[in-house]
Amino acid sequence: MRLLLRRSAVVIGNDNGGLRMMLGFRRGMATSCRAVLLPRFGDPDVLQLRDNVSVPDLKPNQVLVRTRAVSINPLDTRMRSGYGRSIFEPLLPLILGRDISGEVAAVGSSVRSVGVGQEVFGALHPTAVRGTYTDYAILDEDELAPKPASLSHVEASAIPFAALTAWRALKSTARIKEGQRVLVVGGGGAVGFSAIQLSVAAGCHVSTTCGGESVDRILAAGAEQAVDYTTEDIEVAIKGHFDAVLDTIGVPETERVGINLLKRGGHYMTLQGEAASLADRYGLAIGLPMSTAILLKKQIQYRYSHGIEYWWTYMRADAEGLDEIRRLSEAGKLKVPVEKTFPFTQVKDAHHAKEKGKIPGKVVLELD
């Protein structure tokens, strides 16, 4: 890995008629590093760990992060298999990975919130083509926040993408408030578990569905009811109506149940929007307008039939949300348990294990 130290002359401008010039040194970026590339779609064996992958120059609002840990999200394995190919195939090879925890190695000229040497965590937006499976990742300033001091890099890397997905649905879209009732369908996964903790922290009454192995953990996190969907009838077990439903499963049956359990004026939000799948099936030119029409049809249908708001929800960078997630994590009120870690060089093994269902919880790659 090569580091450059470059001397630069910066013209400051005209100050009371006088031109001031400041000479200084700018710590150079790494020009190349290791990265896991996806040259084509397929099973985990298509992943390639390469040296000497170039590191682009930073834009003014960007931050170069020395990666210490990255978590494997379902989006990573789905993208590797071809999900979103209508968008990503022309851009291959690409680097997978969304979550990150590490240290700031360099900053763009307009970055003010973090500095070189600072420990940070964060997540890239879902459509990024240069992800975090690399020694040096590049993120926008608003995609990063100081890492909670009480967490290790492994623990911190498991949180941002899942928690920001939940935050956008509950806090940005549904705008949940203290005293409201929230139902999380699929509370055992990282997004669902984050949603439960965010709702509890907001003072909401939370119910959830999950597998039997997750019940104790979910109740310990503050949920008032955890229904084991493998042994109980959800519609019988869950009483009353809710102000917000976050459906992390998103199949027709959970959508039907979730919508029927909403109060008038409530919000139903599903992670399983159809934009990418329809674009993959029919191409961008047809698939995206088709998905927009389907979403609009459902929104109008449910607004008139049930008096509720219907949304497809996705993760997006949000500095306010990430700051709240950082504060809750620091206070011990938000965590995503890590089931297993793998060395960065064993990324194929990690994807195989995750895909075969051998590891139901969060998997993290550790870098040297």
Image: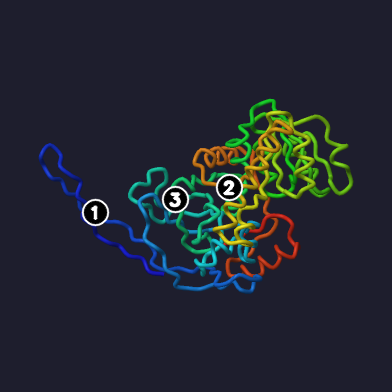
Q: Nearer the viewer, mark 3 or mark 1?
A: 3
Q: Work out whether 172 lies above or below 125.
A: above
> Where does label 3 land, which residue?
140
Q: Which percent across, then down, holds residue 72?
A: 62, 59
Query: In the rendered structure, which amino acid carries the disc numbered 1?
Result: Gly
> Where does label 2 land, which residue?
315
Q: Which percent across, then down, holds residue 19?
A: 13, 45
**In the image, 57: left or right of 222?**
left
Q: Image quarter for residue 355?
A: bottom right
Residue 24 bears which disc, if any? 1
Q: Secondary structure at mark 2?
A: loop
Q: CA distance from mark 1 to mark 2?
A: 39 Å
Q: Secondary structure at mark 1?
A: strand
Q: Work out whether 216 lies above or below 274.
A: above
Q: CA distance from mark 3 to mark 2?
A: 15 Å
**In the image, 176: left or right of 63?**
right
Query: In the rendered structure, which amino acid carries the disc numbered 3?
Result: Asp
Residue that extends furthest to the left in the rendered view of this protein: 17
Q: Which percent across, then down, holds residue 10?
A: 22, 52
Query: In the rendered structure, which amino acid carries the disc numbered 2?
Result: Met
Q: Nearer the viewer, mark 1 or mark 2?
A: 2
- Which residue occupies the foreground of this view, 222 or 89? 89
Q: Residue at x 54, y 67 (%)?
A: 89
Q: CA distance from mark 3 to mark 1?
A: 24 Å
**In the image, 266: left or right of 130?**
right
